[in-house]
Amino acid sequence: MQARIPARTVNSARTERFHPPHSPPRLPRVASADLSASVTVFLIALPLSLGIALATGAPLQAGLVAAAVGGLVAGRLGGCPLQVSGPAAGLTVVTADLIHRYGWRTTCAVTVLAGLVQLGLGCLRVARSALAVSPAVVHGMLAGIGVTIAVAQVHIVLGGSPQSSVLDNLRVLPAQLADLDPAALAVSALTLALLLSWPRLPGRPGGLLRKVPSPLVAVAGAAAVASLAGLMVPRVELPSWRSHALAGLPEGPVLGLVAAVLTTTLVCSVQSLLGAVAVDKLVAGRAGASAGIGRSDLDRELLGQGASNIVSGALGGLPVAGVAVRSSANVHAGAVSRNSTMLHGVLVVAAALLMVPVLELVPLAALAALVMAVGIQMVSLHHIRTVTRHREVLVYAVTALGVVALGILQGVALGVAVAVAVALHRLARTRITHEEREGVHHIHVRGQLTFLAVPRLSRALHLVPPGADAVVRLDGSFMDHAAYESLRDWRRTHCAQGGTVELTGLRAGVRIAEPTGPDGTRCRCRPWTPWRNHQCAGGPSPAPASDGRGWQLARGLRTFQHTIAPHVRAELARLAREGQRPSQLFLTCADSRLVTSMITSSGPGDLFVVRNVGNLVPPPDQEGDASVAAAVEYAVDVLGVRSLTVCGHSGCGAMKALLAPGAGKTLLAPGPGQARTPLERWLRHGLPSLERLAEDGHRAPRTDGRPPADPVEQLCLINIVQQLDHLRAHAPVARALREGRLELHGMYFHLGEAQAYLLTETDAETDGEKVFIRVGAAEEPWPADLSGTRSHNGRRTGVSGK
């Protein structure tokens, strides 16, 4: 008997598929988009890798090694699937300086050590910390590196050799111009012309040609012209792989090697992490982006870059980092997985082994021109405009000049120091002014109020005479404890002497110096967030008392006193002095989900609100509860409101109770020996709405033209119409309608949609009265009576009854 082979075995680590005997293993599928994207990236990476190796003074094969390792190792292990790694222009200056000081084999060892440091940082999960560096410092560093690259490559473009520093290159540039090589200059000019003009080819044929990467076209075109014309210019020389130099033991001063490792780690890590963030933005903005491409794991990306540098350095390659040009090309070419990056590495390996005769036709001047163009593009006008807009151009300029004159590590350190100094200056810069207008002393504080500004604040406050009225305006987002105590003590003393103090501004009246909430926890919430059992984030919640609801109420009261009350105290004080003058009576349901001030965008003193179960208005001829009639009379005759709104809502419990089987009979005549409960006695006022539904429910209002979703919504809408009829029967309302000083409105609020609808009259008439209304979505501006709600057609609507 033959044993059955399981089709799938699952363990805790992975899932494996077992194939029948003699079945060939399945190769992983590669999407066509990844295949085409890998070819595009390869065509860009090949000339750039050779050019960067030339610019650093390293063996040209080292650029190909770094490109292949970046594609295969970083592409497989990195946390950003679509980022392409390889020899980057930002590392050119660092590598060139290392080769000049310590030689190639030690430079490879430094690359390996930098990779080990990156692995350690990735294990410590500090990748996000690298993004805390000011963008002005990063952009300034890249600009300084770009200037250094461009100045150095100018000498090769002119047919000479670059010096070891920017200042030396600038000093010997006049002599180089006097002794230029016409052939090298012609090849460089052709390369630049093709590089700049190829992306701008017009027409439909130009669109097809533009699919070929411009760096490849520029270098290939220059190589073809140089070969056909027989120009005598230096060309690429790729020695045999057998003589390729690998990493050796580092030789040199310990402090110098440590600084070299740290510099390489810093530049590689920051450039790769910023590149990963940029790739995320490109993928998010790409039309039809694949849902399977998640956000980058920066710690994993740092681990992948560290592994790449270890392998590249050990194999005699350049340092590896994420490259913006290749990564953006990969995204725009439609790559959907890390397979495109890895395939590009495979293609680089194939080219390094099989295309040596072709690569040796490339003139060095063409590669120098290509790298010079890349260096110039690193000085981004967009970045300069951005840092200027954010007033950080000083940080940018100091960093760039420091990198050019002193080196990358020194320039970045100088830029960080200037960035910290600028931040401290902004924090300490506070303008405090005092002026007297109409007997009131105004103290205006602009900026952050810290202990450094306390002496100036005290001088300005003591300019206010005892017993005078004072207004202190705080236009800042931060106040430390020293400033808070100084202001509090002065306010207490001034008020004790008979004066008044009003605090206004962004933080007026808030206990800014005490960062914790009233219960000892840090509160980061804004005044209108405490819905849904509000809990302040940050800090453990205190244990509730035995009465959980009472604890929530007490907590809400404390939050109001400390957070909301300071913002509304002045307005409430005015209302207390002048009395209430609401413009509208708002009659709605007692449902806890209906927040009247929220859906009408109103504040204290705007609405005279009456709430009851089912937003019912008992007719005036019925005996019983007269509270609604009293509120209507008080609002119309005493307060003089201009509008009266009945607001129903979806899912109303009162309407559900009315629609329950047998509810109508029970409310009209309870069973023998049964007495009506208070709720049943109240719901009797909803029976006219139920009868109206039975008579002509098919003519119920519609929300935006659609029929009611269910009988409950149908009854809710008809109930609003019925209650408006009941309101017309009340004497104060009828009198105000005849005199033209009152309008009636109907409103329906759909809880699930968070959508308010205003009811509008139709042309249907019954006994000469317009009684049926439709519902329009709130979209257009509405008159001042209902400032927070909007009508469907922008005109005065509602059932006015005039």
Image (spheres, helix red, strand yellow):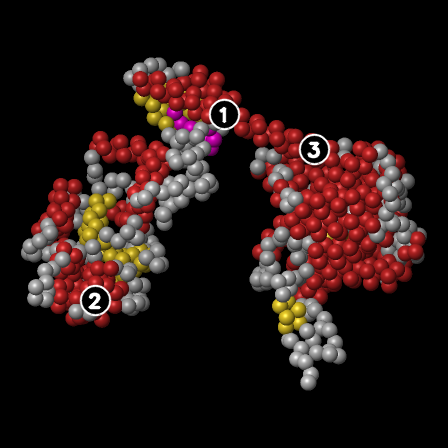
The image shows residue 777, relative to residue 426, as above or below, that is: below
Task: Tell me if label 3 and label 1 are in contact, CB under 8 Å.
Answer: no
Q: CB of mark 2 within 8 Å of CB of mark 3?
A: no
Judge left or right: residue 541 versus residue 647.
right
Image coordinates of residue 713 in percent, x first then y, are 27, 64
Report the residue at 70% width, 62% height from top. Answer: 340
Residue drawn at 7 percent across, 66 percent down: 672
Q: Residue at x 28, y 60 (%)?
A: 650
**Residue on which the image places disc 3:** 413
Which residue is located at x 57 percent, y 28 percent? 424
Kindly identify the amino acid type of the residue bearing the numbered disc 1.
Thr
Comparing labels 2 and 3, the label whose residue is closer to the camera: 2
Query: Mark 2 Cα within 10 Å, few/some/many (few <14, many 20+)?
Result: some
Q: Secondary structure at mark 2?
A: helix
> For this view, does 245 lie left or right of residue 776?
right
Q: Secondary structure at mark 1?
A: loop
Label 2 sits on residue? 659
Which one is earlier in the sequence, the residue at label 2 or at label 3? 3
Task: State the CA–CA distance, disc 3 to disc 1.
Answer: 27 Å
In this rendering, would 467 be left or right of 238?
left
How far apart are the two marked residues, 2 and 1, measured between alpha carbons? 64 Å
Residue 84 in which image quadrant? bottom right
Of callouts 3 and 1, the N-terminal one: 3
Q: Amino acid at mark 2?
A: Leu
The magenta segment is 472-479
Residue 95: x and y in percent read 81, 43
- In the picture of the structure, the residue carrying the numbered disc 1 is 450
The local secondary structure at tag 3 comes to helix
Dot 3 amino acid type:
Ala
